[in-house]
Image (cartoon, helix red, strand yellow):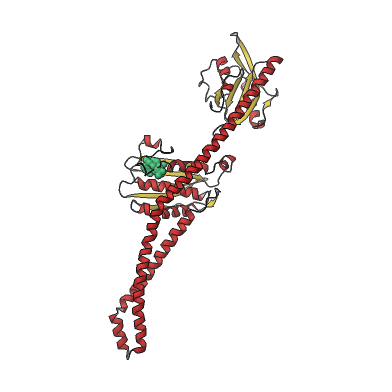
């Protein structure tokens, strides 16, 4: 709260109380604290209604409701239609009262909807002008602070966009070697099969050509025996089937890569999460296959309104972490399911697990336990912000020596709000 409120608000010669949507106090300025004899943190978190001495609870509730219903970021309520008085200590030590008939709303740094109530003494004309002037100064200062906050937010978002880009590039570099290997392997046996097939075709052509020149069928039968026709026939089918499978494998790797690197428009649309996960597992196949067996336990889930290429990025980060957590060979289980209006997916591994002090830090940017050059410590920080952007949650359970399970929950329908649309990577 102190970063939202500049020093001028703290030292204003009038009282200011900030509450959240539920009426819990988030801030009471210095003037009011001093007059009420409160410690700085004393009122924080308490309900406003019932907190101040001598305040009429009904009037206060009505006042807060009016503030909720009528105030907009540009509209301050300042009339006597509805007001509330509280008892304070006067300068002379006697008890006196402060009145509030003024309130306004504003957004907190994390999108909270705050209400501010301004308390002032019954004032003479002259004091009134002074009051108006200080209030205008305070509003101006708050507005300046908000502009500065927006500027900083824009800078952070820009930095984040760059980070995502460089993380993506690093990820692609890491995967490229694996993908090349994945393609090389089927290409290797397809081309060896083609060579064998070319030899078989030569032999078969010799048999066919012999038909014209042969004096009798025995001569052809003899040639077939010499060339081992029976074996060629059986092997032909196997070689063709194996080659077809190899070509299919290369095709699926290429489709996966295309899916994965599809231009990220930043738009949300209905997507098949299972296809996204399959694609990502395919892309990461080479990183995974020497580390773990991948088991899929897919549930029944509907299409999800999401940015699938970013969700693929999250899945990839979780899979890579799981593979990298395996001391030797292990198992990675990917589960999916639906719970009310959300779908979830889990990536569970039988890897090294994490201590609770590590768990506290894993979503912090640049936190890594991997050797320099192996990990940037950005994978989970970025995954966290992608999931948040989807209004989802990312939860983790881990036990040292046993393994780790990350669960990502996403709303099936993406709630549209200005906040989300602003955050872009
Ligand atoms: N499945 C897991 N099992 C054990 N530790 C994990 C697991 N996932 C993450 N961690 C821990 O969290 C740290 C942060 O993970 P994060 O993905 O953010 O970064 P990184 O993997 O170290 O580097 P990068 O992903 O940028 O290459 C890891 O260094 C590791 O210590
Ligand atoms: Mg990682």
Q: Nearer the viewer, residue 382 or 97?
A: 382
Q: Residue at x 36, y 41 (%)?
A: 372
Count the numbered circles shown: 0
- Above or below 74: residue 331: below
Image x and y of residue 403, in percent? 35, 43
- Above or below 400: residue 10: above
Image x and y of residue 132, in percent? 67, 21
Q: Residue at x 34, y 89 (%)?
A: 213
Q: Nearer the viewer, residue 22 or 255?
A: 255
- Above or below 153: residue 222: below
Image x and y of residue 142, in percent? 60, 27
Q: Nearer the viewer, residue 50 or 425?
A: 425
Residue 133 relative to residue 333: left or right: right
What quarter of the picture does the N terminus occupy? top right
Q: Residue at x 41, y 65 (%)?
A: 247
- Above or below 87: residue 417: below
Quadrant of the rendered image holding ligand 1: top left
The residue at the far bottom in this view is: 215
Q: Residue at x 41, y 54 (%)?
A: 176
Residue 377 relative to residue 419: left or right: left
Residue 3 relative to residue 188: left or right: right
Q: Nearer the viewer, residue 10 or 33?
A: 10
Viewer can see residue 180? yes
Image x and y of residue 291, in percent? 33, 51
Viewer can see residue 124? no
């Amino acid at each position: 709260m102190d970063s939202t409120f500049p020093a001028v608000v703290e030292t204003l010669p009038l009282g200011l109380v900030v509450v959240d949507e539920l009426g819990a106090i988030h801030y009471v300025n210095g003037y009011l604290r001093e007059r009420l004899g409160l410690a700085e943190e004393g009122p924080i978190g308490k309900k406003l209604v019932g907190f101040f001495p001598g305040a009429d609870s009904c009037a206060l509730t009505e006042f807060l409701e009016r503030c909720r219903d009528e105030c907009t970021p540009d509209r301050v309520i300042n009339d006597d239609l509805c007001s509330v008085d509280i008892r304070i200590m006067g300068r002379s030590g006697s008890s006196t009262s402060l009145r509030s008939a003024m309130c306004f709303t504003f957004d907190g740094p994390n999108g909270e909807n705050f209400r501010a109530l301004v308390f002032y003494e019954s004032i003479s004309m002259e004091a009134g002008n002074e009051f108006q002037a200080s209030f205008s100064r305070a509003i101006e200062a708050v507005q300046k602070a908000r502009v500065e906050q927006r500027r900083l937010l824009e800078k952070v978002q820009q930095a984040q966009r760059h980070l995502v880009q460089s993380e993506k590039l690093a990820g692609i570099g890491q995967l490229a070697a694996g993908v090349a290997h994945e393609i090389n392997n089927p290409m290797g046996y397809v081309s060896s099969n083609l060579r064998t097939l070319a030899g078989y075709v030569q032999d078969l052509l010799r048999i066919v050509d012999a038909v014209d020149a042969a004096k009798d069928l025995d001569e052809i039968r003899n040639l077939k025996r010499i060339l081992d026709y029976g074996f060629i026939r059986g092997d032909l089918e196997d070689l063709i089937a194996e080659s077809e499978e190899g070509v299919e494998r290369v095709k699926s790797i290429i489709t996966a890569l295309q899916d994965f690197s599809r231009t990220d428009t930043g738009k949300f649309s209905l997507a098949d999460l299972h296809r996204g996960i399959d694609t990502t597992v395919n892309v990461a196949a080479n990183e995974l296959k020497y580390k773990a067996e991948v088991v899929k336990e897919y549930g029944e889930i509907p299409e999800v309104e999401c940015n699938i290429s970013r969700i693929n990025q999250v899945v990839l980060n979780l899979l890579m972490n799981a593979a990298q957590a395996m001391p030797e060979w292990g198992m990675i289980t990917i589960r999916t399911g639906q719970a009310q209006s959300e779908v979830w997916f889990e990536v569970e591994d039988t890897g090294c697990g994490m201590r609770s002090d590590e768990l506290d830090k894993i979503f912090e940017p640049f936190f890594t336990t991997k050797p320099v050059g192996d990990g940037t410590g950005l994978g989970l920080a970025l995954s966290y912000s992608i999931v948040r952007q989807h209004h989802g949650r990312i939860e983790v359970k881990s036990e040292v020596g046993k393994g780790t399970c990350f669960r990502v929950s996403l709303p099936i329908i993406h709630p549209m709000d200005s906040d989300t649309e602003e955050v872009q990577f």
